[in-house]
Amino acid sequence: MKIFLKFRILFFISALVLSLLFQKYSFAEDAKKIAVFPFEIHSKSDVLPLKSQITDRLTTELSKAEYIRVINKDAFLSLLEGKQIDRELAFVIGKKISADFVVMGSLTRLGNLISVDVTVADVKDRKTISGIFAGGTGKESIGAIAAKLTDKILLRIFVKQTIKKIEFKGNHRVENGAIYNVLKSEKGKLLSERKLSSDIKAIYKMGYFSDVKVEVSDAPGGKIITFILQEKPLISRIEIRGNDDIDKDDIEGVMTVKPKQILNLKEVKSDVENIKTLYHDKGYLNANVSYKIEKTGNKGTRVIFNITENKKLRIEKISFEGNKTYTDDELKDMMEVTEKGFFHFFSDSGLLKMSKLKQDINKLKAFYHNNGYINAQIGEPEITHDKKGIYIKITVMEGKQFQVGKVGITGDMLSVPRADLLEKLHINKKDYFDRESIMKDIDLLSEACNNEGYAYANVTPETITREKDQKVDVIYHIDKGNIVYFNRISITGNTKTRDKVIRRELAVVEGDLYSREKLKKSYMNLTRLSYFEEINFQTEKGSETNLTDVNIQVKEKPTGMFSVGAGYSAADKAVIMAQVAQRNLFGRGQTLSLSAYLGSETKNYELSFTEPWLFDMPLWSKFDLWNTEKDYDSYDLSTKGFTTTLGYPLWEYVKGYIGYSFSTNDVRNIDEDASRWIKEQEGEITSSGITVTLSRNTSNNFMFPTKGSKNKVSIEYTGGILQGDTSFTKYTGSSTWFFPLPLDNVFAVKGRAGFMHKNEDTKIPIYERFFLGGMNSLRGLRNVGPKFPDSDDVMGGKTMLCFNFEFIFPLLKKAGMKGVLFYDTGNAWENGYHLDDMRRTAGAGIRWYSPIGPLRLEWGHVLDGHVLDRKDDESASRWEFTIGMMM
């Protein structure tokens, strides 16, 4: 600590030097005497009050200057009586009262506008200083006007005392800007002894300097202030001693002091507290932390943190006192801080974290207040500990329980009938008074106002407590305010994505009536794009009271992908995958993808391009070109073709699509023991068809939805006037619903159904029929459906039904990895739907939005009794792996 004793001695020596320096540049001998003469008033009314107000306020502001002495008006008012104030009179009277300067002028009021012109008479040199002016609105602005005039008067009188420049010397590591930010002295302002004194203290307070001196020198047109600084030594090394149970990396993670920084004692002391908090949060309630500073060489120091850990303690018992309605166990269940459990050696169970305990106290208080106990109080926890552990006692004062009384709405009317608003109120659904419901109702009513254009509506709840009845009446008062329109909509942070790509997703337009609902919809639309890590909407008042500006801040995330890898698929065993994709091509919102999949049974090459706004219209378009070769159990299939699709929004969340597809399909390498029906399909055929689709998507996230739904129905028609060798109609529908659960969990359910028939006297190709099994239907099974009469080959069905139930939970939040538990059931049939013949599987897996795209690894186990349906080489469970969409 000796080094800091020297710092303090240097500080006092510097203060003494500064006081001597100020004697050299003291303003006492230069203090000027100023007289403020009554102002001339040009106004239709309030002449005397305005004269008194401007003169008195200007006198007060000038009196605050440390180098000014204002002469009392009693010394000259009698001399001015009955005379016209002008420059000659100012010189004469000023000389009589020994004034250096005389301030005089006029105040003009036009309507609500006030302007003040000032002239300063230099009595000694018999000259005047004019052109000093300030203005404002209303009498209440006279104080601000006087302050502005004072600054201008002083700068004109004391030109030589104006600060022309501020310099710093000796600061090698601390930037000039950082020091300048703590100063009160400013370039262009008057030199002030008080401000310089404050500046020296402020620089010392930064903690980076052991000595601060100041020099003031003359320069043409003013003064130059030079701060001469001596920086504290650098921290050459930091040592942490005594940390046996907590890693050094964890301790360094809470510290702000780093090597190669300038030594700052405040930061060192702060880190001592940070380390203590870390130890306390990990159960070391008796841990002690101290520091020591040692010199190393001429300019370096070593900072040593000494830690005495002592025994780790956990919470043995949490008890409550005064709780009558709810038991100790019920209250403890609401707390995040818990008593130590049986497996506390392997977890954080029973650790006391003060920040979490404070949150728990607030939770308990809110719980009582939300259940009618409006006067309930939760005392500060009483914490004690011994050798065994920590004991927490919490005092509860419940008070009486109050029911909800009368509920009403007063104030401004909305287009929504009040009866409808009352019916929607959360408080009306409660038996007992609930403060949380009050807050929800304020938001509900505010949003109702916002959606009608009243952006700054104010909803004030009034509660009337009836002690005798133990009821609380609630009255919501609505003050709509003025109608507001969207003014300027600005977008920042989009370094790649073009403005128009973002703006076309917005439901709000400049000039539209304000609507919170449309702002929410705009946010959801941008979120679904999945181009941004962060999206923030901020509204602020515009240039006029009836306008509001919208500032949209985004932080872009990578949308391009290049990957080459190997993996394992249940169907193809070892696979090689490669993909190049960009979901926001050139920032235009277009998607271009080229992919290759090479497995033992499947080879697929695909090129895809998507334009979501064709011709700058909400006309979605997509073109796909593919080449696939797949080895089935009894035959091989080679297919090449293309699909082009157009989509258009029909209603909110609803889009319609129409697509045309053409392909050539070659069935070959048929096994000798294959079904006769398969052999009949050998050779190359073409398929030409149109698919019409209607979809509705209200999900809140492109990749990992937590709420909303995805619904789709489609009809595919081939043959007929479209030509081709196939002729059938296929009807499919699917519906997926997502339900948010506590702790970021999600429950999802998906249903799919299908039906198809031939249009002409041709057979439906086997590869067009319904097959279930695999990642997107029945996980754990493969090739589920009816079989050929003359072989064990699955021929696929003409009807299909499948349901998937999933519980999705976070595994590694920061990495974006989730876990899933699932149950699947379904089947495909030749005709009809047979609910008594449904295959069933269950299992678990992980999902990860990895750098190469969404990955799914899931294991399914067969639950039903169709053991005979499995082939000899198939087991009762399977692993499934894929890259692509989640659900």
Image: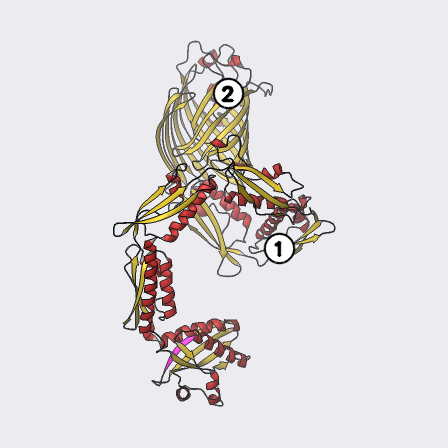
User: Which residue is label 2 attached to?
Assistant: 861
126 in magenta:
yes
Q: Which residues are magenta?
A: 124-133
Q: Are marks 2 and 1 in contact (CB under 8 Å)?
A: no
Can you tell which quarter of the image residue 530 is in?
top left
Main structural element of the magenta stretch: helix, strand or loop?
strand
Q: Residues within 10 Å of mark 1 (few under 14, many from 20)?
A: some
The kind of residue on which mark 1 rests is Thr
Q: Nearer the viewer, residue 818 or 885?
A: 818
The residue at the far right in this view is 468
469 in magenta:
no
The kind of residue on which mark 2 rests is His
Can you tell which quarter of the image residue 600 is in?
top left
User: Which residue is label 1 attached to?
Assistant: 460
User: Can you give x and y, in whole percent of width and height, for residue 521 in the image?
Assistant: 52, 45
Q: Is residue 302 left or right of residue 78?
A: left
Circle 2 — which element?
A: strand
Please tell me the numbered disc located at residue 320. Answer: none
The number of callouts visible is 2
Q: Is residue 64 left or right of residue 303?
A: right
